[in-house]
Amino acid sequence: MRIALFITCFNDTMFPGTGRAVVTVLERLGHSVEFPQDQTCCGQMHFNTGYRPEAVPLVTRFARTFAEYDAVVTPSASCAGMVRDSHPVLARDHGSAPLQRQVTELVPRVHEFTEFLTDILDVTDVGARFPHRVTYHPTCHSLRGLRLEDRPLRLLRAVKDIELVDLPAADSCCGFGGTFALKNAETSGAMLADKTRAVLDSGAEVLCAADNSCLMHIGGGLSRQCSTVRTMHLAEILATVEGAAP
């Protein structure tokens, strides 16, 4: 199977370690991963703020860049949802039959990282060891968009020596929402305060999720409270073999 990593522009710019973690896990499982150099943004920011015509060239580029791969894996539920749900809409509205065909053929091969592991590779134990108390935040796109359900938790439960604790009100939004946090700062801040309180109440050392955007938002709130709770993308925990024999 020919696998491509879609890192996303957000991760590439701010959290490149997450992409490396995805590659580490997949290579540990015996798979080679390619990184197409022509990849750019999926167009989510443009789409969500009303610049739909401006997003079409990005959809076109995405379809062309990843057309030859059997699987496109991304460590972002948000961007996976954009490609699967919104790229077909943009291609249809653009009125290009070739683009619609390309998008229709590609979309079923685009997978968020945890669903790729559980659904395509049929794996839950990826050989990780992470002896820390961890809680999981199901981001809105992973919970309500992709409906990942317990896939991330199944992977976390299989990590050796992890102590997985529940996050109070886990299904509540953290308040990020991309530009929502900028345009509605007071509302976003109130939602963030509730989420950071829940994280602290969980007693966790580490908060993880399937989207670095939400982790950045929550991590910023925790940092401003001088909290010692770390934020880590789930892929980084799965890539860790802390304390393993050399």
Image (cartoon, rainbow, N blue to C red):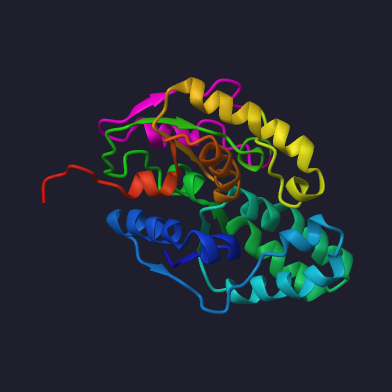
Q: Can residue 237 be seen in this view?
A: yes
Image point 26% across, 39% down: which residue?
A: 129
With respect to residue 19, does 162 lie above or below? above
Q: Is residue 239 left or right of residue 150?
A: left
- Would residue 246 appear left or right of 221 to someone viewing this image? left
Q: Residue at x 76, y 72 (%)?
A: 99
> Which one is in front, 185 or 129?
185
Quarter of the N terminus within the rendering: bottom left
Q: Is residue 169 above or below residue 1?
A: above
Say left or right for 86 vs 151: right
Quadrant of residue 34 in the image?
Answer: bottom left
Q: Position of residue 190 (x, y in %)?
A: 72, 31
Residue 49 drawn at (x, y percent): 83, 57
Q: Which of 153 and 137 is in front in this view?
A: 137
- Residue at 70% in and 32% down: 191
Rendered image quadrant of residue 197: top right
Residue 163: say if magenta.
yes
| Res 6 seen here | no
Q: Which residue is painted at 61% across and 41% down in the image?
A: 142
How far across and how far down the image is residue 53, in percent?
86, 70
Q: Nearer the viewer, residue 194 or 169?
A: 194
Q: Tell me if residue 148 comes above or below residue 180 in the rendering.
A: above
| Part of the protein shown in magenta | 145-171
